[in-house]
Amino acid sequence: DKWYVSFTIKADKIPPLYHSVSETIGIDLGVSTFATLSDGTVYQLPDSLKKAKIKLGKLQYRNRNKQLGKRKVGMKSSKNAQKFARNQAKKHADIAQGRRDFLQKTTTEISQKYAHIRIEDLNISGMLANHKLASSVVDSGFYEFRRFLTYKSPIYGTVVEVVDRWYPSSKTCSSCRHVQPMPLQARVFVCEACGNSCNRDLNAAINLASVPKDRVRMASPELTPVE
């Protein structure tokens, strides 16, 4: 029930974009807070997405006993079941569109402001295997976030680098570099060596921004690292 239109146009070459922040920025992605930047900027998933997910859950619960039919055995679905299936598909599509809109706007804003971006190479498949995290990971769209940042890098002249997934950004003190265990439920990093106290996500983002060059690689093959 949707239409898409594609246009081909001639346009002048886009002039170079001068970013307002030239320093390297680290971005930590998480379930509690979607994205935390090393300068303290925070991005949260819009409330509209959370509300839409709740409505979908209620719809599914109310209709949990409806039979959609089985073609192989000649079992037809009822009109109410068909109506539920259409409503469910529409709500799934609305959630996906809302998430995509948020990710597009957020990555464009970041790409326009920051010249040098570093993100962690998250083990998405491993996170999806954890049934406690899987739903939140899918809702957040971490993979799409990275993909959007990467393909926008040549458009806005940004450098996007990926940090080695084994680099302990969450376990390292951003002040003295001491490494210590960090349980998932802890939201504040308190260094056992120097006493530094910092929000868990901000601490990780600062570490991603200052990670040694031998622990990073380019996210886009069209670009070369800045010196």
Image (cartoon, rainbow, N blue to C red):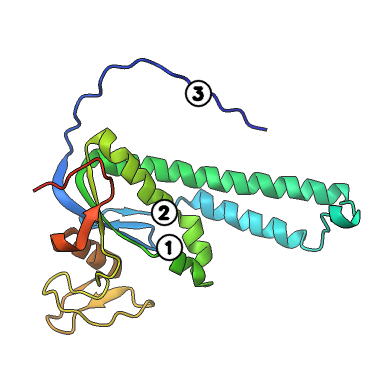
Q: Which residue is mark 2?
A: 143
Q: Label 2 is placed on what type of residue?
A: Tyr
Where's residue 212, x and y in %?
14, 63
Residue visible at 32% across and 39% down in the picture: 152
Q: Is residue 81 shown above or below 179?
A: above
Q: Are marks 2 and 1 in contact (CB under 8 Å)?
A: yes
Q: Is residue 34 left or right of residue 16?
A: right
Determine the residue located farthest toward the bottom in the rendered image.
192
Residue at 25 percent of width and 72 percent of height: 168
How many neighbours does mark 2 have within 10 angstroms: few (below 14), some (14-19), or many (20 or more)? some
- Circle 1 — which element? helix
| Label 2 element class | helix
Q: Gap in Å between the C-alphas at discs 2 and 1?
A: 7 Å
**Lower position in the chain sequence, tag 2 or tag 3:** 3
Q: Is residue 75 left or right of residue 214?
A: right
User: What's the amino acid at mark 1?
Assistant: Ile
Residue beneath disc 1: 124
Q: Between disc 2 and disc 1, whose residue precedes?
A: 1
The spot of residue 18 in percent (x, y) is: 16, 34
Q: Amino acid at mark 3?
A: Ser
Q: What residue is shown at x 46% (from left), y 50% (from top)?
A: 46
Of callouts 3 and 1, which one flags the residue occurring earlier in the amino acid sequence?
3
Residue 32, image quadrant: bottom left
Residue with the mark numbered 3: 6
Q: Nearer the viewer, residue 57 or 93?
A: 93
